[in-house]
Image: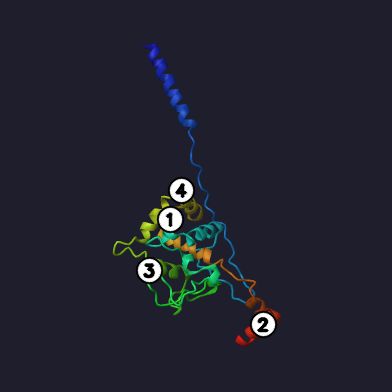
Amino acid sequence: MRRLVYLQAIAVLLAMSGCSTAPTEAPVVVDSAAVQPPSIQGYEAMKVPADNPMTQAKIELGKMLYYDKRLSGDGSRACYSCHLKENGLTDGKPTAIGAYEAKLPRASPSLWNIGFHQALYWDGRSPSLEKQGMAAWTGGNMGVSGKDGRPSTADIAAKLNAIPGYKTAFQKAFGGPATPENMIQAISTFERTIVAGTSAWVKFRSGDAAAFNDAAKRGW
């Protein structure tokens, strides 16, 4: 009996030792340090919503989401698909083509300096990047409507929460998992960094007459 008790005690100690040395996942620290929005000489200060302050973690997460085709309903396109660098951050088409090959009625606008705009879409119906982003995501652009067998925004968020890299990135940026709302907040934050602060236009507006050629001056 004494030997049995002794062996049991050793087994308990070994088990406790194993538990104490088991690797534990390091907690992710939330990045809440504010980042100042970009500025351009001659432009009004960029207005950032009070409920979505800019942080470096949001910018980095937003960039990941901006280029990720998994955000679209059919997995065919990302935000970037309609705002290509080689086309001045447009798609270069007369009118845009959305997810599921939907033919949209208007052209994709450029995103240069979009954070300074206070009215979005060609008709100005959206007052913020956050509202515009959600409308584009659930509308024809990205096709995440949750109707007719198509995924909903909650479905896409759940998909990202199953990806370890995204799980960590959302924890760092927002202190919790991906949600439809904070996904759009992150993308909007990244879009506010798309700034052409040293373009010929900015230089010309700032007094450098040589920044424009004669044709550009006639156009102005």
Q: Sequence order check: which comes first, mark 2 or mark 3?
A: 3
Could you tell me how far apart the alpha carbons at marks 4 and 3 are, in whole angstroms?
31 Å
Q: Earlier in the sequence, mark 3 or mark 1?
A: 3
Q: Earlier in the sequence, mark 1 or mark 2?
A: 1
Residue 196 in the image, given as x and y percentages of width and height: 60, 71
Q: Mark 1 is on which residue type?
A: Ala
Identify the residue shown where x is 37% and y is 64%: 144
Q: Residue 205 location in percent, x, y?
A: 65, 80
- Eye-nearest disc, 3 or 1: 3
Q: Secondary structure at mark 4?
A: helix
| Residue at x 43%, y 26% (from the top left corner) | 15
Of labels 4 and 1, earlier in sequence is: 4
Answer whether residue 43 is visible to the viewer in this image. yes
Q: Which residue is mark 3?
A: 101
> Label 4: which residue?
164
1 and 2 marks in contact (CB < 8 Å): no
